[in-house]
């Protein structure tokens, strides 16, 4: 398997264009199941996760065509008919968000058999709220041998769905199912993440009637059929935030473009509090740090517009060399500190007590061999490697390939010493 080697010490100077958001793209791809007309998605990231989902959608009857068009990377998804309502375990377990095909399949063809996604390294991540939503819309749900069997032969019916906790995936799933339901659906305590607004815009371009995404109440008036549409995927706020942290860590000046500064406001505030300079521009941010050491700052993850859990590992890496002690509280997932012991292999001083990590900044990290168990944890090790003395080698980078497009190229263009070491095909232990 491939690994990434980083030689620490180089400042970052240059421009990084931000890609389309993985976590939006994969829900938008699932929306293609809702219509017999082609859905054209532009600003599409090319990632392992979009490839996984493309493979599953193809099995369900969707033709998936990738090309480089006048608007950059695009994917056209076309499902003239649903040829199978079966999403098998071997595909769903590779990428949890594949579970979101359940709602569109039931909405369009009245039935589906979709594998439960199973466990995850960052937390239990149940799908009870997804099932609660689809059931509220009138589907009969049975669970057997690891599979969800859902049936709504006479179609879904609009309903009130009140989520007991905020869930991005369950809110998106409910929207994806309710657009073709008969009547009005009101989702209360909805997640407010920008990816939901993106999904609303795409669904409405397809002829749906969705209002309120980005607020805690989303209202959907069902329509009988949806059309094809063309939609540009929202910029990836987590990728933007990751490179912003990388620039603050390595020093220098990096301009992030093709993005939206308001999507990372809670991170920008923390970066400024720590002593980096963040200049908001029309299409992104410029992040600078010249010389002086950053200060430790505390943070707590929260649903949008709070500090994103998907940026927590990166910020922890930043705090490993800051001046003082930083307290980092993770409130979204129960096991999202798996990067801490790996950062400690690089010389970081971190202790974890339940949902809180204390990071005492050290003057210098040292390169080492490390590995990580999820996407954002992996990139936090790359960020730490940017300042560690000597070479840091990160293995299991298939996690990185799931969510960061051309990472070595983007960082390399700004002067980072990052290279991919091609594997020998042997699986890593
Ligand atoms: C999305 O996951 C993202 N993934 C995650 O990014 C992100 O960390 C998360 O939202 C929070 O922002 C995708 O969009 C593909 P949730 P999701 O449902 O939708 C609990 C990355 O690295 N919950 O908002 O799965 C759950 O266990 C990934 O790109 C239930 O209890 O997150 C968690 O504690 C990692 N029952 C909390 O809700 C349910 O049915 C919030 O999870 C669903 C969720």
Image: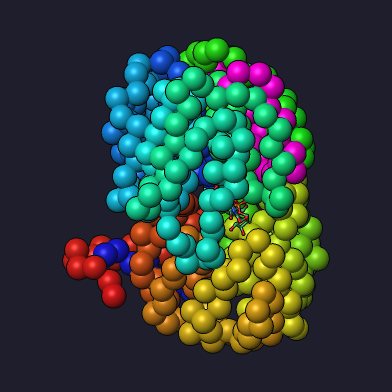
**Residue placed most toward the observer, 362 or 232:** 232
The residue positioned 66% from the left and 33% from the top of the image is 197
- Which corner quadrant holds the N terminus? bottom left
Task: Write down the quadrant of residue 4 in the picture.
Answer: bottom left
Verify whether residue 366 appears in magenta.
Answer: no
Task: Look at the picture and state if 167 lies above or below 359.
Answer: above
**Residue 126 percent coordinates (x, y):** 53, 56
The image quadrant where one finds the C terminus is bottom left
Q: Position of residue 369 (x, y in %)?
A: 39, 79
Q: Nearer the viewer, residue 103 or 427?
A: 103
Q: Does residue 171 appear in the picture of this structure?
A: yes
Which colouring convention does the figure follow?
Answer: rainbow
Out of 361 and 92, give the one closest to the viewer. Answer: 92
Magenta segment range?
A: 181-208
Image position of 96 with respect to 231: above or below: below
Q: From what the image shows, is residue 82 above or below residue 256? A: above
Q: x and y percent of residue 386 in the render?
A: 52, 70
Q: Quadrant of residue 313?
A: bottom right
Q: Is residue 326 left or right of residue 346?
A: right
Q: Residue at x 61, y 35 (%)?
A: 136
Image location of residue 404, percent across then percent down: 46, 52
**In terms of depth relative to the viewer, which is nearer, 6 or 414?**
6
Count of numbered marks: 0
> Does residue 70 show up?
no
Which residue is located at x 60 percent, y 47 percent? 129
Does the segment drawn in magenta span residue 206? yes
Q: Indicate left or right for 142 with 358 as reference.
A: left
Where is 61 relative to 373, above or below? above
């Amino acid at each position: 398997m491939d690994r990434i080697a980083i030689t620490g010490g180089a400042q970052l100077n240059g421009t990084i264009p931000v890609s389309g958001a993985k976590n939006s793209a994969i829900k938008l791809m699932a929306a293609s199941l809702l219509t017999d007309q082609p859905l054209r998605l532009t600003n599409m990231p090319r990632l392992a996760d979009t490839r996984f989902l493309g493979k599953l959608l193809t099995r369900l009857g969707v033709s998936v065509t990738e090309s480089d068009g006048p608007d950059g990377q695009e994917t056209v998804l076309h499902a003239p008919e649903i040829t199978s309502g079966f999403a098998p375990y071997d595909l769903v377990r590779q990428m949890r968000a594949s579970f979101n095909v359940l709602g569109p399949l039931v909405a369009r063809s009245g039935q589906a058999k979709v594998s439960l996604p199973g466990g995850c390294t960052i937390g239990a991540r149940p799908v009870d709220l997804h099932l609660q939503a689809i059931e509220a819309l009138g589907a009969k749900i049975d669970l057997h041998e690891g599979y969800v069997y859902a049936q709504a032969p006479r179609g879904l019916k609009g309903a009130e769905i009140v989520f007991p906790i905020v869930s991005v995936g369950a809110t998106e799933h409910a929207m994806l199912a309710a657009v073709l339901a008969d009547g009005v659906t009101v989702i209360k305590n909805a997640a407010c993440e920008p990816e939901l607004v993106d999904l609303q815009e795409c669904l409405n371009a397809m002829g749906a009637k969705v209002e309120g995404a980005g607020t805690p109440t989303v209202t959907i008036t069902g329509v009988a059929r949806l059309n094809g549409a063309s939609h540009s995927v929202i910029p990836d706020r987590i990728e933007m935030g990751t490179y912003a942290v990388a620039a603050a860590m390595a020093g220098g000046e990096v301009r992030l473009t093709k993005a939206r500064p308001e999507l990372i406001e809670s991170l920008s505030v923390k970066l400024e509090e720590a002593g980096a300079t963040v200049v908001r521009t029309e299409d992104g941010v410029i992040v600078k740090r010249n010389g002086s050491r950053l200060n430790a700052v505390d943070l707590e993850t929260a649903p949008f517009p709070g500090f994103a859990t998907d940026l927590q590992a990166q910020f922890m890496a930043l705090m490993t060399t800051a001046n003082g002690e930083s307290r980092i509280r993770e409130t979204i997932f129960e096991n999202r500190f798996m990067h801490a012991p790996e950062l400690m292999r690089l010389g970081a001083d971190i202790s974890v007590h339940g949902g809180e990590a204390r990071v005492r900044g050290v003057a210098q990290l040292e390169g080492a061999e490390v590995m990580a168990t999820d996407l954002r944890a992996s990139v936090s090790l790359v960020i730490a490697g940017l300042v560690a003395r000597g070479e840091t080698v990160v293995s299991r980078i298939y996690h990185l390939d799931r969510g960061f497009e051309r990472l070595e190229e983007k960082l390399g263009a700004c002067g980072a010493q990052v290279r991919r070491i091609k594997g020998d095909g042997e699986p890593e232990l």
